[in-house]
Amino acid sequence: MHEEGDFVKPVTVRLKDGRTIALRSMRAEDEDKLFEMFSSLSEDAVRWGLPPYTREVIKRWISNLPHSIAIVALHGDRIVGQASIYKIPPPRRKGVGNLGIYIHQDFQKVGLGTVMVSELLEIARKEKLHKIELGVIAENIRAFRLYEKFGFKVEGVLRDAYLGDDERYHDEIMMGLILKE
């Protein structure tokens, strides 16, 4: 399904609510559609993210594509999800990647997060990555449970590490998954 940094063809998946989405590798030409998606995300959808999601931020993500496993979910020609594993470049961190995911509010709670994380982990294994790390805000229970479902383990807690929209600090739970032992 995945070959030399790109899908041979998009993967089509039916969500729990019956809608069909296509998963494929993120491309440089996705910049406008990514910007449209991030511009239309609700406050709740980015509550635990790292805004702002400007064109400059999206250009930076695209410039990092050679160091990433990055996918998008499309409903028709509209991007409704973006997920990536950034491969940490220093030699002492070889084989370690950091996972991040965003899903449009209209496509949450229908299995898209599960599909996207599953696809990313499958690609990461094929690329022989050793470990995937991530940080999740303690109150983001849905995301925490998603990562647990895939075998991620809590590796620590960064106390008061995230300043939320509520102007309060929140703990960030650091999780990791060893892909090969």
Image: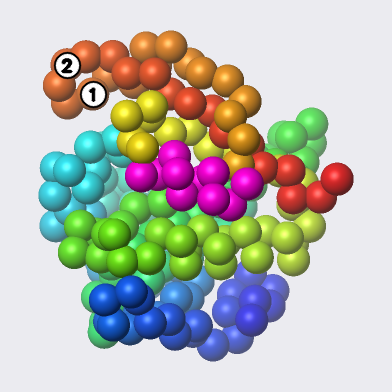
Q: Can you tell which quarter of the image residue 7 is in?
A: bottom right
Main SS type for the magenta part?
helix
Query: In this rendering, is residue 59 above or below 162?
Result: below
Looking at the image, can residue 65 be seen? no
Q: Quadrant of residue 109?
A: bottom left
Q: Quadrant of the N terminus?
A: bottom right
Q: What percent of the width, then of the height, locates residue 100?
A: 46, 47
Q: Is residue 140 magenta?
A: no
Which residue is identified by label 2?
167
Rendering coords of residue 10 (x, y %): 49, 84
Neighbours of disc 1 within 10 Å: few (<14), some (14-19), many (20+): some
Please tell me whether mark 2 sits on a helix, a strand or a loop.
loop
In the rendering, at what x and y percent does residue 146 appear? 46, 49
Q: Would you name the residue on which mark 1 appears?
A: 164
The residue sitting at 18% across, 64% down in the picture is 106
Tell me which residue sits at (60%, 86%) in the image: 8
Who's the residue at 73% across and 43% down the image? 178
Q: CA distance from mark 1 to mark 2?
A: 5 Å
CA neighbours of label 2 inside 10 A, class few (<14), some (14 to 19), many (20+): few
Residue 146 on the magenta span? yes
- Evaluate if marks 1 and 2 touch, with contact meaning CB atoms under 8 Å apart: yes
Q: Which residues are magenta?
A: 142-151
Kindly identify the amino acid type of the residue bearing the numbered disc 1: Gly
Out of 171 and 71, give the one closest to the viewer. Answer: 171
From the viewer's perspective, tell me whether residue 155 is left or right of residue 92: left
Q: Quadrant of the C terminus?
A: top right
- Could you say where residue 86 lies in the image, as x and y percent from the top left? 57, 47
Q: Is residue 74 left or right of residue 130?
A: left
Camera-nearest residue between 177 and 7: 177
